[in-house]
Image (cartoon, grey):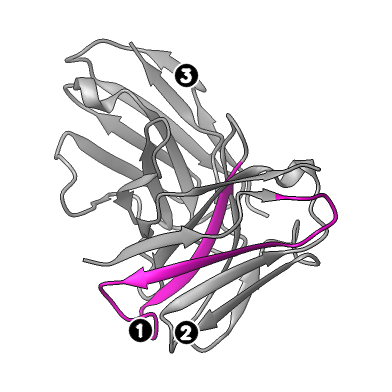
Amino acid sequence: DILMTQSPSSLSASVGDRVTVTCRASQTINRYLNWYQQTPTKAPKLLIYSASSLQSGVPSRFSGSGSGTDFTLTISDLQPEDFATYYCQQSFNTPRTFGQGTKVEI
Amino acid sequence: QVQLQESGPGLVKPSQTLSLTCTVSGGSISSGDYYWTWIRQHPGKGLEWIGYIYYSGTTYYNPSLNSRVTISIDTSQNQFSLKLNSVTAADTAVYFCARETARPRYGTDVWGQGTTVTVSS
C-alpha cells in the first residue's frame, strides 16, 4: 500500500492567513493526488484533484501543487468556513489511501 | 445533480454481518465513468477506503478487509451494497458511500452523508 503522510497534523491560524499543508507519498504517484475538506459530522468534500485542478464550485483561494511524491495544499486568505480537517488521497493505485489529516484550527 | 444515500442497520452484533445499501439518485449507476465506492471513518479518526465496484461488477477491495468484504451492484435499482462479515467492535465507524471518477481519475466527487454503524451486543 502507498503510505500518505501529511504535515502538520494540526495548525493554528487566523482569518486572513495563508496556510500550507504538505502531503508525501511513499512512492511516486505522478499527479494522482486529491485533497478533501471535512467539517465535523459532514462527509468529506473534494477540493482539488489531479494535484492542482480545482473542483467545480471550490473557491479560488484553494490551490494545489506538486507531482511525484511531494504535494502541497495552500489556502490563501483563510476564511472562517475553512476551519476544518484536510485529507490528501492518492488515486494512483488500489487500495486508495489517505493521509492522516491536518486539522486547521483558530 | 447526483446524490447518494446510505441505508441499513445502525447496530450490528459482534460476529454478524454488516449490510449497507447506497441508493444513487439523479444519475445512472450504469455509467462507465465512475467507481462506486465505500469508505469508512472510525470515531475521531481518519478515512479508510474499503473498496469500489464498477458498473460491470468488477470489484477492488482493501486487502486489510479483503476476506470479509463484498461489494455488489444492482443496476435495476440504481443501488450498490456493502457486506462486511464477522464484525467486531473495531468495525464501529461512520460508513460513506461515494462516487469516484474512473476515467480520468478525478477524485471522489460525490459522497453520501454517512451512516453510523455500531458493533455491540
Residue at image location 37% in from the left, 76% down from the top: B103
For the magenta stretch, what is the residue range?
A: B12-41
Q: To which chain does the residue with label 1 belong?
A: B
| Badge 2 vs badge 3, beta-carbon distance below 8 Å | no
Residue at image location 30% in from the left, 42% down from the top: A64
Which of labels 2 and 3 is toward the front? 2
Please tell me whether mark 2 sits on a helix, a strand or a loop: loop
Q: Residue A95 placed where, x, y %?
A: 62, 61
Please tell me whether mark 3 sits on a helix, a strand or a loop: strand
Tag on residue A10? 3
Q: Amino acid at mark 2?
A: Tyr
Q: Are discs 1 and 3 both within one chain?
A: no
Residue at image location 83% in from the left, 59% down from the top: B86
- For the N terminus of chain B, the image quarter is bottom left
Q: Of callouts 1 and 2, which one flags the residue occurring earlier in the amino acid sequence?
A: 1
Circle 1: is it few (<14), some (14-19), or many (20+) Cα within 10 Å? few
Say which residue label 2 marks. Answer: B55
Left or right: where A83 falls relative to B86: left
| Badge 1 vs badge 2, beta-carbon distance below 8 Å | yes
Where B57 falls versus B17 (above or below)?
A: below
Q: To which chain does the residue with label 3 belong?
A: A
Q: Amino acid at mark 3?
A: Ser
